[in-house]
Image: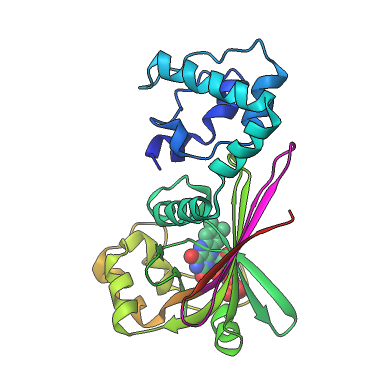
Amino acid sequence: MTNSWRRCGDPWKAFASRSSKPCAPRNATTHYPSINSFVDVTAAADIIPPIPRCPLSATRILVTCFTSLRASRDPTRRAFAIDDLHSLDQILADVFDELEHAPSQPDHPWRLPVLGTTGSHGCELRTVVLRKFAPAQLALYCHTDLRSPKVAQLQQHPRTSWLFYHPGRRVQVRVTGITQLHQGDALANEFWNASAPASLNLYRALRAPGTIEAAPSSNLPPELAGRPLTREEVEPGRQLFVLIETTLQSIDWLRIDQSGSLRALFKWDAEGKRTANWVAP
Ligand SMILES: Cc1cc2nc3c(=O)[nH]c(=O)nc-3n(C[C@H](O)[C@H](O)[C@H](O)COP(=O)(O)O)c2cc1C
């Protein structure tokens, strides 16, 4: 997957909407564009996409456009095209690729997933920062404060859900897994050391997250509030730093599309053996 794709979303949508954004990927054929791309372009058959200001050659763009137009008019070919572009392996590879790159891209929508836990009153949801995805370990990581309620919830109910949505691609990914908490161990220290002090100042908070305050409060010691902290200043927070590691058990992938959505379910057993199935959207 190219960075230009990741930055700009679906280039075919941009074509169809006559967007002048320079956002086509260098190799559009290696990605799965919207199924709608066929329909959108056909619906306005006289629309030839404007040639974007991008590194793609004009010939290449036209060849790709006409290939898609032809595919959209031939039901057999179109079905083939959908299968071709949406193999289960390709979808999973794409999801993994996005998850791997999201933490380092501030604007990537999957950098801020929703983490779901089970509390005493039922389901609890909150936004977190995705810090890392390790495909080899099938593990998602985020940080939290030892005193936050979600830590106790995860200790009691390690089964966890993560929710990701990409508005540009209309892709929802629902992950389930089992969570392990790391505090003061080698892995937690590795993540702490790799984090910028700006991401760690919260661990100097005076009171537990969720404590009732008498007045509006940043919950930081007055001498540390309202300014960037140095590495030395955040260091005492290490003892409150918890690394949340969720080992994947399933990924439910859904691509919403007015002309026909697609859904796929990937599951891993305890040995890491994977099954993959198409699912009714
Ligand atoms: C953009 C954003 C990113 C956040 N990232 C984290 C995070 O990485 N870790 C975390 O514990 N809380 C994070 N929070 C705060 C949580 O959403 C939540 O309010 C807090 O962790 C308390 O949750 P709890 O009471 O369920 O433990 C973030 C909030 C926002 C708005």
In the image, ligand 1 is in what quadrant?
Answer: bottom right
The answer to whether 204 is drawn above or below residue 60 in the figure is: below
Residue 36, picture quadrant: top right
Indicate the quadrant containing the N terminus: top left, top right, bottom left or bottom right. top left
Left or right of 269 in this view: 261: right
Q: Quick check: is 88 in the magenta stretch?
A: no
Q: Is residue 180 visible?
A: yes
Residue 107 position in % (x across, y down): 47, 44
Residue 243 position in % (x across, y down): 42, 76
Front one among 230 and 4: 4
Residue 263 position in % (x across, y down): 66, 54
Residue 45, picture quadrant: top right
Instruction: Give me the residue at 70% from left, 31% from top.
Output: 75
Residue 265 position in % (x across, y down): 62, 62
Instruction: Give me the residue at 66% from left, 27% from top.
Output: 72
Q: Main secondary structure of the magenta part?
A: strand
Q: Which stretch did the figure color magenta?
A: 248-271
The answer to whether 172 is drawn above or below residue 122 in the figure is: above
Instruction: Give me the residue at 51% from left, 80% from top.
Output: 179
Q: Is residue 218 visible?
A: no
Q: Quick check: is 258 in the magenta stretch?
A: yes
The answer to whether 108 is drawn above or below residue 253 in the figure is: above
Instruction: Give me the residue at 66% from left, 38% from top.
Output: 79
